[in-house]
Image: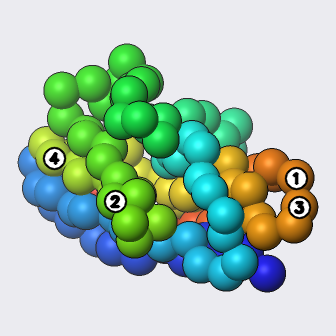
């Protein structure tokens, strides 16, 4: 059974920083793309950042220059470093990964979500 477990969310003041982590565990053969999405109250879930297995990255325009996505392929972990946080970054952040479990086909997995609140 494959699962994604996120950590690192919390309350931070505007201008502050947080680092989110997401570790994939279980019977994993390989992992393709990994990414972070967020969903604010009353809004649709949106892509924040994504990273391929080769390290190519993609960011939402709203976070470019402030957020950095990275991954440790040996640890099956993806990170999101969030700097210069703004109140509009407040949301539940979800980890996402396309994983090939042993003996199965590629499928998309989601974490349980970790809340980030930016407020003074």
| Label 2 environment density (alpha carbons within 10 Å; few <14, some 14–19, many ≥20) | few
The Cα atoms of the two marked residues, 1 and 2, are separated by 22 Å
- In the rendered structure, the answer to whether residue 73 lies left or right of residue 64 reads right
Q: Earlier in the sequence, mark 1 or mark 2?
A: 2
As helix, strand or loop, the secondary structure at mark 3 comes to loop
In this rendering, the answer to whether 81 lies above or below 62 is below
Residue 99 seen in the current view? yes
Label whose residue precedes the other's in the sequence (2 or 3): 2
Q: Is residue 18 above or below residue 31?
A: below
Question: Can you identify the residue that label 1 sits on?
Answer: 105
Q: Are marks 1 and 2 in contact (CB under 8 Å)?
A: no
Q: Residue at x 31, y 48 (%)?
A: 70
Query: Which numbered tag is attached to residue 104?
Result: 3
Are the residues at dot 3 and dot 4 in contact (C-beta closer than 8 Å)?
no
Disc 2 marks which residue?
Answer: 72
> Residue 101 or 41: which is nearer the viewer?
101
Q: Position of residue 61 (x, y in %)?
A: 37, 18
Return the mark for residue 83: 4
Quadrant of the frame with the N terminus:
bottom right
> Is disc 3 surrounded by few (<14), some (14 to 19) or many (20+) residues within 10 Å?
few
The mark that comes first in sequence, 1 or 4, is 4
Does dot 4 land on a helix, a strand or a loop?
loop
- Image height check: is 23 above or below 81? below
**N-terminal of the two: label 2 or label 4?**
2
Horizontal side of residue 68 vs 29, given as left or right: left
Mark 1 and mark 4 in contact? Answer it, CB < 8 Å: no
Q: Quadrant of residue 117?
A: bottom left
Residue contact between numbered discs 1 and 3, judged by CB atoms under 8 Å = yes
């Amino acid at each position: 059974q494959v699962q994604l477990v996120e950590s690192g969310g919390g309350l931070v003041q505007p201008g502050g920083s947080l680092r989110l982590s997401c570790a994939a565990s279980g019977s994993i053969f390989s992992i393709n793309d990994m990414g972070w999405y967020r969903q604010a109250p009353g809004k649709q879930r949106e892509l924040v950042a994504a990273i391929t297995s080769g390290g190519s990255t993609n960011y939402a325009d709203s976070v470019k220059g402030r957020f950095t996505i990275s991954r440790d392929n040996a640890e099956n972990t993806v990170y999101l470093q969030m700097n210069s946080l703004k109140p509009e970054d407040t949301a539940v952040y979800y980890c996402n990964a396309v994983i090939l479990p042993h003996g199965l086909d590629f499928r998309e997995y989601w974490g349980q979500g970790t809340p980030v609140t930016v407020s003074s």
